[in-house]
Image: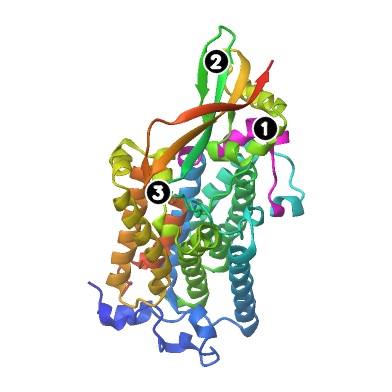
Amino acid sequence: MASLIPPPGALGAGPVSGARTGRHAGWWFPPTALGRVAALRLLAYAFVPVDLLVTTTWVGHHGDVPGVLYRPVMVARLLHLPTPTRTGVDLLKLALLVATVTGLVGVLTRATTLVRTAGVAVFALYGWWMLVAMSYGKVDHDRVAFLVLLGVLPTVGAATLGEQRRSLQAGWAIRMTQVAVVATYFLAAWGKLRFGGWNWATGATLTRAVLRRGTDLAQWSLDHPGVLRTFQWLLLLLELAAPLLLVVRRERTRAVIVGALIAFHVITYLAISIIFLPHVVALTAFLSLERVGRREAPS
Amino acid sequence: MQGGAADSAAVAAAPELTGGARRARLAVAAVVFVLLLAGTAWGQDDQFPFGPFRMYATRQRLDGTTSWYQLEATTVDGQRIFLPGAAYGLRRAELEGQIPRFVADPGLLGQLAYAYEVRQPGGPDLVEVHLVKWRQPLEGGRPSGDPTSKTVASWRR
């Protein structure tokens, strides 16, 4: 019966609860089904080619921009990364595609060493790709949780789709991703208070957003500043409340909240054409993805 | 539906983490999230990926003026055209992130003309590139009147 499976994060899940786990340190290691890691590997490595070739093509355009306009961010300077060129950017993109396809093959054929090695390469190359993206005068913040996800995936050993066996390695990887997702929301609110002040929500920031990049669906809102202000309050409160996601224990409640957040991102896209797709991929770490591909255990 | 015995077998524990592996993971978590917190509190965009999450974080005054920039060009046959970011390889926000440089050294706009030629080999030849600032006054958070434009930097071939 399914009820025999304790909810993720519950202690006392048998031998894995581990007497050596300190009360607080244990929070970072909730025994979690390995199938969730396998599903996230599939999702993340399938998303990278979509990101490169369909939804974030502007990164590759930087290869055509003369080097004098390259303003490398600190990490790019510390690593002495070369100024992007057409050839360099194309090679980087190709290497990243090869690494992600290798990762996908590794997940589907259950080749653990292959998937972990490819996973390290995907993390390093995607990180480099992001430094090319953010080094021309504008930095986005829809990538942090996805970068954390790519970073933690190779730290987990063998994992098969649908696998219900629980592991502390998987627990840490999932927890890191969840905290990064929550941090993205919460720290975005902090940023608004830091740069916009405590009365950020009483201003006309969304009016500015709609004027800059509003779609036809959003133009009506320019005549209703009160509605936009209400959205600003909701947005700020939603972001500040995000840490509550980490304490929700009921699987169904978590799924409903994740669904609502995805709806929020889709509506934002329909209104002002901004979508946090990589972040949404990381957000699915809150779902019981170990159900995907679950099979009857052999008798 | 799965049987109880099958489930019990399926959830059997994977091996424990060793003390060292556990400490290493806790250290990574501490470093990542402390850097992220510090970046949010004191950092700038330069510290990506640990900088502050500042998209649309500034406050737009209800009775202020909101502004944005765009690139326009004069073609060899005298037409004035709008250049979308994809035509020269920079997003608008990236153009806006380097405004002081373009104003101080309009020759940099020539670099964008060069990028345009690389990206649009079949496009019309450009003889001038203009950086145009658009301003939209607001009243009570509502757009008031039509936006006005002003050229803030120009480059001629």
Q: Give me the residue at 39% from left, 67% from top.
A: A286
Of circles 1 and 2, which is in front?
1
Residue B10 vertical placement versus B141 (above, below): below
Task: Give the quadrant of residue A42.
Answer: bottom left
Determine the secondary structure under disc 1: helix
Residue B54 vertical placement versus B113 (above, below): below
Q: Name which residue type carries label 2.
A: Gly
Coloring scheme of the render? rainbow
Residue on which the image places disc 3: A206
Residue A272 vertical placement versus A1 (above, below): above
List x then y, in percent, for residue A268. 36, 49
Viewer-proximal residue, A74 or B24? A74
User: Is B145 on the left or on the right of B81, as rendered?
Assistant: left
Kindly identify which chain the residue marked by label 2 belongs to.
Answer: B
List x then y, in percent, for residue A44. 47, 55
Q: Which stretch is magenta?
A: A53-74
Residue on which the image places disc 1: B103
Q: Give me the residue at 48% from left, 35% from top.
A: B135
Q: Name which residue type carries label 1.
A: Val
Asked whether disc 1 touches disc 2, contact meaning CB atoms under 8 Å apart, the reply is no
Determine the secondary structure under disc 3: helix
Asked if badge 3 and badge 1 are on a common chain, one would say no
Q: Residue B34 lies in magenta, yes or no?
A: no
User: Is residue A39 in view from this perspective?
Assistant: no
